[in-house]
């Protein structure tokens, strides 16, 4: 994937975001692209940065730590998002390198992060709206109780919610998943909604996403 390819892809993604915003009466400025770079090279990340991307999402702490260190030259400093499942033994490193943890997927992880943090760390609570066993996250049924406990943890700043929709051929089938997350966010006063990826981000935007996590649409298929 050449820099020119990434530029073309980003222009296409931005156009698709704009069209989704126009369809739903929203502002393009309300949508943050989080470039998913879990398998991408540092050169690809630098290219995206030079094209205006300022938010990057990584799934694995160890891989991210090396990239973030090597890309410390990027100014202004990008915002690094932890978007993968966070293992307890990686929390210390995650807190050192990430600006926001999107994948607080259980009360146990929330408590562990709170206990290791030396500052208030912005987080999103991952909710398993679809109920798939393969997906992480707190169930919608348990959310109210879990949120009541997590929101009291002094070192966590709960900014919003995150979800991963099922993989389906017809994106209309995941619309209710995104709509439910928006309803939960509204109910609990949580404005940031990270939902939607390459295959379904337009529907997510139409249903209220404020962050979309885009990998393949920017960088192509991983080899």
Image (tube, rainbow, N blue to C red):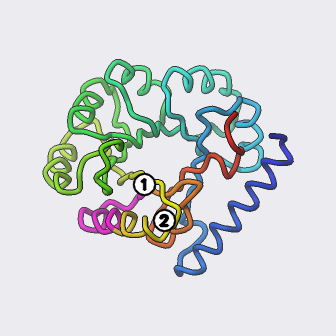
Tell me which numbered mark, 1 or 2, is placed earlier along the sequence: 1
Q: What stretch is highlighted in magenta?
A: 180-194
Measure the alpha-carbon separation of dots 1 and 2. 12 Å
Q: What element carries label 2?
A: helix
- The residue lying toward the viewer, choosing from 118 and 206, is 206
Going 62% across and 46% down the picture, which residue do you hit? 215
- Residue 86 lies, with reference to residue 213, above or below; the image says above
The percent coordinates of residue 120 (x first, y second) are: 34, 37
- Horizontal relation, residue 175 to residue 13: left or right: left
- Looking at the rendered image, the disc whose residue lies closer to the viewer, 1 or 2, is 1
Where residue 76 sits: x, y (%)?
A: 66, 40
Which residue is tagged 1? 166
Q: Is residue 20 magenta?
A: no
In this rendered view, identify the residue nearer to me: 170 or 177: 170
Can you tell which quarter of the image residue 177 is in?
bottom left
Q: State which quadrant residue 111 falls in.
A: top left
Which residue is at the front of the view, 168 or 190?
168
């Amino acid at each position: 994937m050449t820099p020119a390819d990434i530029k073309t892809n980003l222009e296409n993604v931005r156009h698709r975001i704009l069209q989704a915003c126009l369809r739903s009466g929203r502002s393009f400025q309300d949508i943050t692209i989080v470039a998913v770079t879990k398998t991408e090279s540092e050169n690809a990340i630098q290219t995206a940065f030079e094209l205006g991307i300022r938010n990057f999402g990584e799934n694995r702490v160890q891989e991210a730590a090396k990239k973030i260190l090597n890309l410390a030259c990027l100014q202004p400093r990008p915002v690094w998002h932890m978007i993968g499942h966070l293992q307890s033994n990686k929390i210390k490193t995650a807190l050192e390198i990430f600006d926001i943890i999107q994948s607080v997927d259980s009360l146990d992880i929330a408590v562990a992060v709170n206990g290791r943090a030396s500052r208030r760390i912005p987080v999103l609570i991952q909710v398993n709206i679809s109920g798939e066993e393969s997906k992480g996250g707190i169930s919608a049924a348990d959310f109210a109780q879990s949120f009541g406990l997590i929101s009291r943890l002094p070192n966590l700043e709960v900014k919003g919610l995150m979800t991963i929709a099922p993989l389906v051929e017809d994106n209309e089938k995941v619309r209710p998943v995104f709509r439910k997350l928006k309803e939960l966010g509204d109910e609990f006063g949580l404005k940031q909604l990270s939902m939607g990826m390459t295959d379904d981000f337009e529907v997510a935007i139409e249903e209220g996403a404020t962050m979309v996590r885009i990998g393949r649409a920017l960088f192509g298929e991983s080899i």
